[in-house]
Amino acid sequence: MSSEKRPVRVAMLGCGVVGSQVARLIQEQADDLAARVGAPVELVGIAVRRLGLARDVDLPADLFTTDAEALVGRDDVDVVVEVIGGIEPARTLILSALAHGASVVTANKALLAEHGASLFAAADEAGRDLYYEAAVAGAIPIVRPLRESLAGDRVTRVIGIVNGTTNFILDRMDSAGTGFTEALEEAQALGYAEADPTADVEGFDAAAKAAILASLAFHTRVTAGDVHREGIAEVTASDVASAREMGCVVKLLAICALEDGPDGPAVSARVHPAMIPRSHPLASVREAYNAVFVESEAAGQLMFYGPGAGGAPTASAVLGDLVTVARHRIAGVRGPRESAYADLPVLPMGSTETRYHVQIDVDDKAGVLAAVAQAFAEHDVSIQTVRQEGRGDDAQLVVVSHSASDADLAATVEAVRRMAFVREVSSVMRVEGAHD
Amino acid sequence: MSSEKRPVRVAMLGCGVVGSQVARLIQEQADDLAARVGAPVELVGIAVRRLGLARDVDLPADLFTTDAEALVGRDDVDVVVEVIGGIEPARTLILSALAHGASVVTANKALLAEHGASLFAAADEAGRDLYYEAAVAGAIPIVRPLRESLAGDRVTRVIGIVNGTTNFILDRMDSAGTGFTEALEEAQALGYAEADPTADVEGFDAAAKAAILASLAFHTRVTAGDVHREGIAEVTASDVASAREMGCVVKLLAICALEDGPDGPAVSARVHPAMIPRSHPLASVREAYNAVFVESEAAGQLMFYGPGAGGAPTASAVLGDLVTVARHRIAGVRGPRESAYADLPVLPMGSTETRYHVQIDVDDKAGVLAAVAQAFAEHDVSIQTVRQEGRGDDAQLVVVSHSASDADLAATVEAVRRMAFVREVSSVMRVEGAHD
């Protein structure tokens, strides 16, 4: 039907887990893609570090090159798909592709979270698209909904489970009662965690995604460095058990919120483990699945759920962008540009409103509860519940606060820690998604 | 920033529950809309049946007119928002708006499910957009994800809870153990069901949405008349209790699937109550919430969740479309057109593969189970489990089949019903979302 049309020519950078699936889909769905785009989609070159490696997909050898710079500089390339990951050479190659007149589809969260502003500026200067649905939550459509579907609404909060590795680990700790180390080893054995799990476990991956989500939701540039970040390595089996007692589950959450700042509206962005009630839609996100929960003024509560990683799911998101960008090339237009007009300040973590669940090992004597409650009051932190558990050497206070500034909460915990009858503050965890 | 730009002029048809919220958002979010669209968005007229009614939003009286035809015929209108609902006069007014050069945003599922083809053809002829995110599942972005995000993937199945009224009723029956009539009355008292609940309870509303979802997912025109439809009025407290015993919950599902037809790929579209396992993501959709579960070849399993109705949520979806369509007007372009290239046949219900849960009151004597099993086998229906419950006058067989054609299953049940020792087939319900 569109066989006489000039094809849309695609160059790909990288051919690993995601790239080989992108290439497979372009081949296998050629007829559907041609019908949906309005012209054939042709893969004209793939830049890789080493030639001759075995790939998960059968591709002509002459598609491959090690000269990525020459590939993105070709005159006949309409769209460059970047699935190398990391900052360099991805950044230089994307800038070069845009400068040479190609549109770009990328799955590179780290790059966007750090250099988004300059990349979007380069896309503007070139008059080309820079699309990145695959950079956040894999196959789950979340970039397009935030950028387009909710463009007439006011998003107030985004809470995401955006890292499959840590969700798998925390889910195992919750369902099997195992400790962190054991759950991590299981995740590694099953291929859900890398040999060096730092980027996932310490929250770097989630923080990059939080930066992208906050930028989209609040029309404000937020970088990975703006995101407060705590990983899950300190989460203990006892924390998970305490959460369970409260009817909660521990998740690593990426939370982006519109806040009342000192000078008007502001944005907060943070990644940390938190307890959420089991009745919350995010609580049922099991194993390595991802989900993004969005609250907005008019729409209310929305959730987007699906596989957050993996070759084929990520490739699905890349292909969706590829179809859109290819349609734009044929029509000679662009999609919506970066929207950063609101330019809101990003609050430091201390000013962010949170709630704490605090477990305190105390001496079992009269007046302890009152003294601890007094410490909370002195720091302007209102207590929602406090209960005393155990007797003698096992005496424990469990306090759940109302919302307060994170700085006031941290100072409260510090003050409690110094009290004479406090043996140990055995667990501090934030509580999210519950009624205040 | 864009104050000197010519505004995008919007006319609205209808100002009821949804329309008044659309008008409110256009007013309250004026600055944000201007920044996101690239020009101010101005509401220039609202057609209503009667002037002078109290509205949920404060609007200048001179915006209102009873002459809808004159409003859509105005030369200065860029976008017409249709929130009247129903077939006429909505159909004629949308065609007139397109013919006069306006783009159209509509929330009208019934109209699209019946007259989609002619409306999309009119949009093509006019070179204008016809957007309809609000027509399916209210605030939940599902049209755009199917039309764009998954455009590079192959969707194989869509299962939706797309009617809030029936989900509320079934949820009450499940959680409170009430019968259908009592739950319906509660839904009516709380405003979740209309005085005449036919469109919801009998599945007409869900069938219209199923037609739209199937059209989008499979690039094929599917009308409401193509959708097999069964409502929930026959669902009994005992069906719900049986589902619970099986670890399932009863939901009214809109199911659209890519099937192996007699002459190649085909589509099925159906709306009926069904049991789904409580572990399925759709099972946790409570009260009047909606959700759409999508399976595709590369992305795997995705779910989109949120409020499926209501003034503000539906208005959020309308506004998202309005922003996109307004951007297109300014850029002088259109979004993706109707995609019906695949043109797959729609299978009749009898050819659709389903599974049945059948409860049979039987005489308590030897050989009954074997005879019933034999009846299933004779109709080529494989049994997954059969269990005998109760003794004497309460003897009962509960059969769960494997996948088979709906016609074979229906014929099996008919044959069982005629057996001498069968007192009654007390419940027949399809089972979805479980491993076969």
Image (tube, coloured by chain):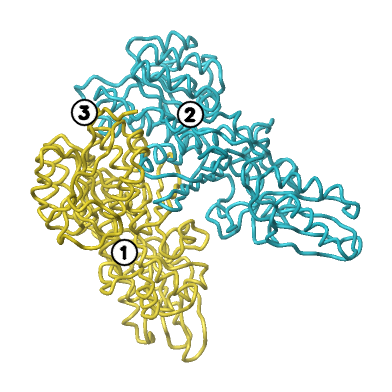
Chain colours: A yellow, B cyan
The alpha-carbon separation of the residues under discs 1 and 3 comes to 49 Å
Find residue A111 and report its horizontal and vertical position in percent.
18, 55
Q: Is residue B161 above or below residue A198?
A: above
**Is A276 positioned to the left or the right of A134 in the image?**
right
Left or right: B379 with respect to A338? right
Q: Which residue type carries mark 3?
A: Gly
Q: Any mark on residue B107, and which?
A: 2
Q: Residue flagged by tag 2: what amino acid is it?
A: Ala
The label shown at residue A332 is 3
Q: Which residue is pictured at 30% across the width and 47% down the height?
A: A318
Decide: is A107 above or below A243: above
Q: Looking at the picture, which amino acid does disc 1 mark?
A: Asp
First-in-chain label (1 vs 3): 3
Q: What's the CA distance linking mark 2 and mark 1?
A: 43 Å
Q: Residue at x 28, y 28 (%)?
A: B327
Cα separation between marks 2 and 3: 30 Å
Up-down: is A239 above or below A344? below
Which residue sits at x=33%, y=37%?
A151
* Residue A85 visible in this rendered orientation of the protein: yes
